[in-house]
Amino acid sequence: MADVRQLLSICEGRTVYIQTHNFPDPDAIGTAFGLQRLLLHFHIPSKICYEGRIDKLSTSKMLDLFHIQIYSYAEIRPELTEGDYIICVDSQKGGGNITDFVGDEIASIDHHPTYVQVEYRYADLQIVGACATLIAEYYQDLGLTPDRDTASALLYGIKMDTMQFTRGVTERDIAAFAFLFPLADQDAMSTLNNSTLEFSDLQAYGAAIEGIQLYGYLGLSRIPFSCPDAMIAILSDFILSLVEVEVAVIYCERKDGLKLSIRSERSDVHAGTLTRRALQGLGDGGGHAAMAGGLIPRDRFELLGRYPDDTLRNAFLNALDEQLKE
């Protein structure tokens, strides 16, 4: 098990950049913020950074409520050098959902499966329900008490990534919740819990329902307009709630390419493995047993052929057959 004291020793005397995956969600932001505050306790300054967009109302509110400052790559690029230290959180190099920034990725703290082996000076890669759980455990291990904003951000990240403790949750996530709950701002948590849906999201729900196609227990739906990552993830959870669907694939075309969100409630279908196999040669993807994501870059669209929806459907059906034969 990784010892955070090693990370503190590596970063001593350095300015650190904490990089989330592209289009950071509450778990990524909570993890980054919790780590930033922990480093600051040991007089190690850091900046949280990302590529993409902060694209969900509740996520934006999280930044305001907990006084989190986060920088886009465009904002920090002029100051970055090859020797600057970068800590990847809720992500790993080569995972397909994180941009390669200028700098030295000396560490990764993540709860996703590893698909590309990378040598870090510090690595804490453990399968738990939320990456924020790992940071909460750092505070406990060091005998530190996070302040209210930090505890709240970590707690919200855990709640959101485990879907209110119903998806991928482990005993360690529950223990982290017990540690953080009395320290968190419950009024702020209520505000966030009541701000997860925007009026424009209703159109996406309608499109997902109208476009769904069933192939046995596999449900696929193409959203005919651009959606942010958070919305696609919500829609895949929504489609999975149908009695007939045990594996859900939702996708839409965006400026950066074709974005996919995959969910599985079957013990014999690993969503991350399914996604990686289906997108092999087309794009990148991966994730947990129950949830995964993927992207087919725009410059690879020609590989989908004249009928991209059919190509994508067949790719997932074939990958599903391969996994079930193992």
Image (cartoon, rainbow, N blue to C red):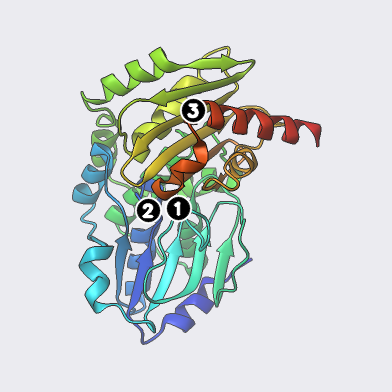
Q: N-terminal of the two: label 3 or label 2?
A: 2
- Residue 38 at x, y = what percent? 37, 68
Q: Left or right of 290: which side holds 183? A: left
What residue is at 51 percent from the left and 60 percent from the top?
A: 92
Q: N-terminal of the two: label 3 or label 1?
A: 1
Q: Is residue 179 above or below residue 259?
A: below
Asked if disc 2 and disc 1 are in contact, CB closer than 8 Å, the reply is yes
Which of the pair 224/169 is nearer the observer? 224
Element marked by disc 3:
loop
Q: Which residue is mark 3?
A: 307
Which amino acid, by three-letter code, is at mark 3? Tyr
Q: For mark 3, does the 10 Å Cα neighbourhood hold few (<14), some (14 to 19), or many (20 or more) residues?
A: few
Q: Which residue is mark 2?
A: 22
Cα–Cα span, label 3 and label 1 = 26 Å
Query: Mark on residue 218?
Result: none
Which amino acid, by three-letter code, is at mark 1? Asn
What residue is at 73 percent from the left and 35 percent from the top?
A: 323
